[in-house]
Structures are given as structure tokens and as C-alpha cells.
Amino acid sequence: MHLSTSFLLLALLNSVRGATVLASAAKPTQFITLDIVNGPVAPDGFTRIGVLANGTFPGAPIVATKGQTLVVKVNNKLTDNTMRLSTSINFDGVFLDSDNIFNDGTAFVTTCPFGPGESYTYTLPLGNQTGSFWYHSQLGVQYSDGLRGTLIIYDPDDPLAHLYDIDDASTVLTLADWLHNTSTSALTSYLATQINPVPDSGLFNARGRYNGGPEVEYAAVSVSQGKRYRFRLINISVRSNFVVSIDNHTMTVIEADGIATEPHEVNILVIHAGQRYSFVTANQAVGNYWINAFINGGTRNPNLNSTLSRGILRYEGAPDEEPQTPMTAGPTGADAVLLNEWELVPLAPIPAPEPDFNLTFRTFMPEGVTAWQINNVSYIPPSEPTLVKALHGETEQMDFNKTENTFLFPANKTIQVEFIDPINEGHPFHLHGMNFWVIKSNGSDVIDTVNPIRRDVSITGNGTTILRFRTDKPGPWSLKSTLAVDNGKLTDPLVLYHFAVGLGSVIGAGLDKVEKAVHPTKAWEQLCPAYDALPPSEQ
Ligand SMILES: *[C@@H]1O[C@H](CO)[C@@H](O)[C@H](O)[C@H]1NC(C)=O
Ligand SMILES: *[C@@H]1O[C@H](CO)[C@@H](O)[C@H](O)[C@H]1NC(C)=O
Ligand SMILES: *[C@@H]1O[C@H](CO)[C@@H](O)[C@H](O)[C@H]1NC(C)=O
Ligand SMILES: *[C@@H]1O[C@H](CO)[C@@H](O)[C@H](O)[C@H]1NC(C)=O
Ligand SMILES: *[C@@H]1O[C@H](CO)[C@@H](O)[C@H](O)[C@H]1NC(C)=O
Ligand SMILES: *[C@@H]1O[C@H](CO)[C@@H](O)[C@H](O)[C@H]1NC(C)=O
Ligand SMILES: *[C@@H]1O[C@H](CO)[C@@H](O)[C@H](O)[C@H]1NC(C)=O
Ligand SMILES: *[C@@H]1O[C@H](CO)[C@@H](O)[C@H](O)[C@H]1NC(C)=O
Ligand SMILES: *[C@@H]1O[C@H](CO)[C@@H](O)[C@H](O)[C@H]1NC(C)=O
Ligand SMILES: *[C@@H]1O[C@H](CO)[C@@H](O)[C@H](O)[C@H]1NC(C)=O
Ligand SMILES: *[C@@H]1O[C@H](CO)[C@@H](O)[C@H](O)[C@H]1NC(C)=O
Ligand SMILES: *[C@@H]1O[C@H](CO)[C@@H](O)[C@H](O)[C@H]1NC(C)=O
């Protein structure tokens, strides 16, 4: 094998990065600052103003080590009033305990947002969690303006470490849908047309192209033949899913949403908004290979061309050019070995407990109504966050408006939710605070309670999906479609968009225990009065 100078440089860089990760392991607490700013951004060659963490899209990457506590100070420096000026951040998939639920960042469930010129510090003990995560705005649809970034928790004792050689910043891969319009104008046009905003482009590692746009250079991922790479694929998409494959390569999946899995080899996978997978690959001849990241974004935007959403896997020694092979959507027919969620087996088996309560969630949008519903009810967030209510002793079912879709359960119980999605819309549902067991995935008829995949995002479909989770952590935990929108202001047109989305619910786990379990800080207590005092234009 030919080791070029640049490969040696790369190896050196990798070991430096590795050293950084290990060095930070020594520090039990990592202090992080994120400045949320408005600024120009042009991932597909079209320049627009975004809402950006530290001025970039994706936002500054956060790199942590197992066992650390992250103390993230978020400074809201937003000034562009054509978009939301307040913000609230969720560190997606990081499971907080009850005593810290107020740092979950879910607007109007566990917190109020904070306005321009204000700061809030999130304290996030990572506990045992390891794997691939992300952070994003959890206020309305603000994250479509760009406020999304990756969060990787490295495990110095990764039980799967023998399967790969390289796992660093260069192996974190993001997929995103991108809108040229601001989220606020997209909402306005949504109101006029009743058509969900369709993105202009699909981005692989923050680069992409759209019909008629400039030939933005595709993001190339550099690998060296003979090394095994652990790629961390993170779908930071707002709405669109991606079908991912790498020409001539298999992908050995070893993680789903922070859960290490038995190695499982596929050559094509669908990743839904919010989901994460790690896979190992890169064992082919030196060359340039297309990474196909076919975006399913909808058909109503002539800019969007799913074929143009892709990247390049480039081996050391290959020329600095695009692959000469056709741009495809990946293996088809008998050549396709698709990742089926139900075939993923967690490395650490935990059987799904028997349910104490069974729920059915029927997701539907009736004719003539522009509101997604769970069991005929569209979620409308309360103006007072659910957690605030619970802390005030409002812990009975009658304390919650029907439209709060808040389902109360005693502490320490197992809940089973069966999702019925009659028209096969495929809604990715995400649970805050804990994983669920996916005892039945859509697409499989098998119910597995022995060692089913545990994760925090799964997708509905007309074949039904069945999840189980525990209510061991008292508090209100959001269970919603990843695009569910939070907005407390009923006069705001955003709420109409929210109506159109509406697929939210809150699991009220042992709310009667919240007053005892949760002791919020003064800083958190001041968020709601401060937010309520803001003029609507700054909310
Ligand atoms: C974000 O920017 C601030 C100010 O420049 C810097 O101190 C901080 O380290 C950056 N955060 C990250 C996660 O890189
Ligand atoms: C860490 O994991 C172990 C075993 O998987 C579990 O018993 C323990 O409660 C976990 N600790 C935390 C802080 O989550
Ligand atoms: C973006 O906004 C412009 C002007 O309001 C509108 O004509 C266009 O249809 C919008 N694009 C999308 C994809 O919604
Ligand atoms: C990202 O999530 C969206 C929404 O579920 C999904 O349509 C898209 O396929 C996902 N992307 C990838 C790469 O899976
Ligand atoms: C990749 O696979 C295609 C189709 O199987 C084949 O024609 C081509 O030669 C392969 N490319 C390389 C570099 O092996
Ligand atoms: C999408 O892009 C490909 C590659 O440039 C091109 O061949 C194709 O015609 C485009 N599709 C549409 C619908 O414009
Ligand atoms: C919940 O449904 C399961 C079947 O999926 C059934 O075995 C169980 O008895 C039900 N439990 C309750 C409490 O209704
Ligand atoms: C929900 O609405 C449908 C009609 O759209 C109706 O048939 C059904 O009975 C309703 N279900 C409930 C639980 O109200
Ligand atoms: C419940 O929600 C409906 C619909 O938003 C609203 O009209 C009503 O005022 C709410 N009731 C209470 C008690 O908050
Ligand atoms: C739930 O379980 C925890 C830990 O086992 C225990 O401390 C707590 O008292 C239990 N709560 C209830 C309401 O049973
Ligand atoms: C759900 O599974 C069925 C097969 O049972 C399949 O036809 C359908 O396309 C799947 N839905 C989604 C959204 O993947
Ligand atoms: C589910 O949806 C898929 C794709 O729309 C369709 O092919 C299939 O027949 C549907 N299955 C059922 C049971 O409705």
C-alpha cells in the first residue's frame, strides 16, 4: 500500500484529534459556549441569512467523552426580525434525569424560550450515554433556518472499537434538507397554499446543489485504503428523509441512536429525521465513489433534484475529481440489501417489559382540515409549559386541555403505544428523556420483546409500529413527530403551521412526583416571566 505524505499528515491529525478526545475525558465537566447569530450561509450556492450556532451551518460541532457533564452556555445574539428572535435548544437524544428535566429545552413542555440579548446555560450530565447525537432549536420551525449541529459522545472503552481504526471529526456525516426561504416566509406560503414547504436542496455534509444553481463542489470524505472507518451518519433534516448508499461499498451498521448494535451489513439505508447510524466501511480499490444521499423531499419545488444530493468517498491516491460513474439512487432490486430496523440487535440485551398500559395513536389528517392529529386531536402547546404546571401541582388529567395531548401515567410503569398510520405517511416519532423498545417496526410482522432495538426515533407506517417505554423518570416528556411545532401564541400564524403539523403529545410520567423530584434553578424560573414580557415580535 502506498502511504502518501498527506496520508501521514492525516494520520497525525487523527491522532491529535484522538488525543484531544482522550484529554477531555480527564475533565469531568466541559464548558461550551454557543453564540446564536444571524449570518449569511450558502451551502448549496444560494446565499441567505440563517439562524446559526457560532455562525456556521451546521453549528459548531460538540465533542464529548462518556461520563462528562456538559455545561453549555447559549447566548442569543439574534437580530434579524424576519425570523424568530427567541430560541430554545434541545440536545437531541441526551437523556436527562427528572431532577434536570428543566434543561431539556423543549419549548412549552419543559421550558420557555429566551429572547434576544439573553443567555441560558444548559447543564447536561451525559451519564452512561455514548454515540451520535445532535442539537437543534426546539422552538417552532426555527431549526429549518439552520440552527442544528452534531454532538458526539466518544466512548474510550467502546466495545466495538475492534471493528474500526478511525473515528474522528472527519467521519461525522450530516444529511440535511435546506430551504432558501426563511422558516417564517415558508409558513406564510404554507398558509396560502396548504402545501408543506418542500426544500430547495438536500445537503450531504452541508453541501448540495439545486436545479439551475451553481455547481457547488460536493463534499468529499477522505479515506485511506486499508483503514476501517466508523462513519456517524446523522439526519439533521427537518422533514425529508434520505436513502443512503456508497457505490460499490457495504455499510456495517454498529449503532442506532446511541445504542451499540451487533454488526449488521447492508448496502442501502433510509434514515429519518432525527435518526443516527454508525457504520463501518471503506475497503475498496483506491478511487472516487459516489455517496448517494437521495432526498425524498417532495415534488412541488422545481429547485429540488434528489439526484444532486450526494457526496464523494475519496481514497488517498485518487484524483481530486468527481467519480466518472453515473449518479444513481443506489442499489435497486436484488442488489439492494436494505437496512431493516427490526434486524438491528442491541449489543447489550434488555428485554422489553410487559406493558401496564396500552395506548393506540392513530395519526391522521382528515379531509378538509389542515391539522395532523393523534386520535383526532391536534396538539397545541399550552402557554404555560407542562413542567411549570406540574410544579404548581396541576397533575391531574383535568388540568390539561384536550389539545395538550397530555397522557398521564403513574411512575415506574411500562407503556405500550401502537401507532396506526392509515395512509402510510411515515411520521418519525421521537421520545425525549429515554429510549423506547421498538417491539414491532413498520414493515415487519414480528413482535420481538426479547431484545428488540432500543432507540429514540422510529417511523410510523400503514403496517403499524409498536413501542414500549418506562415512566421511571417523573416529568413531562415530549413524544412527537420530529417536525411537531411548539408555539404558545395562538394569534401567531406559526400556530396554524403547527396545527398543520400538530403531531405532538406529552407523556406525563408520575407528574405527582415532580414537585419532589425537580428543583429548577432561579435562571430557569425566570425564563417564562421574561418570555411572556417580550413583545410578540421578539418571541
Ligand atoms: C463558539 O464560539 C465561541 C466564541 O467564539 C467560542 O468561545 C466557542 O468555543 C465556540 N463553541 C464551539 C462549540 O466551538
Ligand atoms: C449505567 O449503566 C448501567 C448498566 O448498563 C446502569 O445500571 C446504570 O444505572 C447506568 N448509570 C447511569 C447514570 O445511567
Ligand atoms: C419562497 O418564497 C417565494 C416568495 O415568497 C415564493 O414565491 C416561493 O414559492 C417560495 N419557495 C418555496 C419553496 O416555498
Ligand atoms: C432524514 O429524515 C427525514 C424525515 O424522516 C427522512 O425523510 C430522510 O430520509 C432522512 N434522511 C436520511 C438520510 O435518512
Ligand atoms: C463498482 O461496481 C460496478 C457495478 O457492479 C462495477 O461495474 C464497477 O467496476 C465497480 N467499480 C470498481 C472501482 O470496482
Ligand atoms: C437532476 O439533475 C440531473 C443531473 O444534473 C439531471 O440529469 C436531471 O435532468 C435533473 N432532473 C431534473 C428533474 O431537473
Ligand atoms: C396490552 O396489550 C398486550 C398485547 O399487545 C396484552 O397482552 C396486554 O394484556 C395489554 N395490557 C393491558 C394492561 O391492557
Ligand atoms: C375520529 O374521527 C373519525 C372520523 O374522522 C371517527 O370515525 C372516529 O370515530 C373518531 N375517533 C375518536 C376516538 O373520536
Ligand atoms: C383549550 O384549547 C382550545 C383550542 O385551542 C381553546 O380554545 C381553549 O380556550 C382551551 N381551554 C383552556 C381551558 O385552556
Ligand atoms: C420508582 O422506582 C424508584 C427506583 O426504583 C423508586 O425510588 C421510587 O420510589 C419508585 N416510585 C414509585 C412511585 O413507585
Ligand atoms: C410500512 O410498511 C409497509 C409494509 O408493511 C410498507 O408498505 C410501507 O411503505 C411502510 N411505510 C413506511 C413509511 O415506510
Ligand atoms: C401501505 O402503503 C404502501 C405504499 O403506499 C402500499 O403499497 C401498501 O399496499 C399499503 N399497505 C396497506 C396494508 O395498506
Image (cartoon, rainbow, N blue to C red):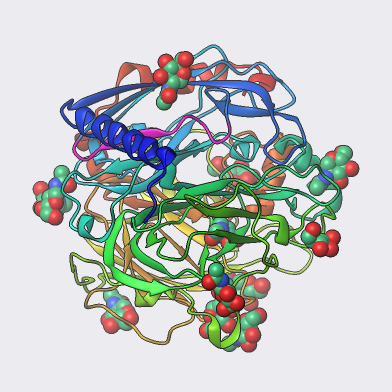
Q: Quadrant of the N terminus?
A: bottom left
**Residue 282 visible to the viewer:** yes
Q: Position of residue 32 (x, y in %)?
A: 36, 22
Query: Is 434 positioned to the left or the right of 216 in the image?
Result: left
Residue at (82% x, 52% y) in the render: 211
Snapshot quadrant of residue 102: top left
Query: Is 91 positioned to the left or the right of 425 in the image?
Result: left
Snapshot quadrant of residue 359: bottom left
Residue at (30% x, 42% y) in the render: 153
Q: Which of 387 and 184 is in front in this view?
A: 184
Residue at (42% x, 75% y) in the render: 441
Q: In which quarter of the image is the C terminus?
A: top right
Up the image or down, 351 lies above or below 81; here it is below
Q: Is residue 63 magenta?
A: yes
Magenta residues (range)? 57-67
Q: Where is residue 117 in the image (x, y as percent from the top left)?
A: 54, 11
Q: Where is residue 25 in the image (x, y as percent from the top left)?
A: 19, 32
| Total residue callouts | 0
Up the image or down, 424 lies above or below 276; here it is below
Q: Which of 143 and 236 is in front in this view?
A: 236
**Residue 109 visible to the viewer:** no
Residue extending furthest top?
117
Query: Is 339 positioned to the left or the right of 321 in the image?
Result: left
Q: Position of residue 23 (x, y in %)?
A: 20, 28
Q: Which of 287 and 391 is in front in this view?
A: 287
Magenta stretch: helix, strand or loop mostly: loop
Q: Which of 368 and 96 is in front in this view?
A: 96
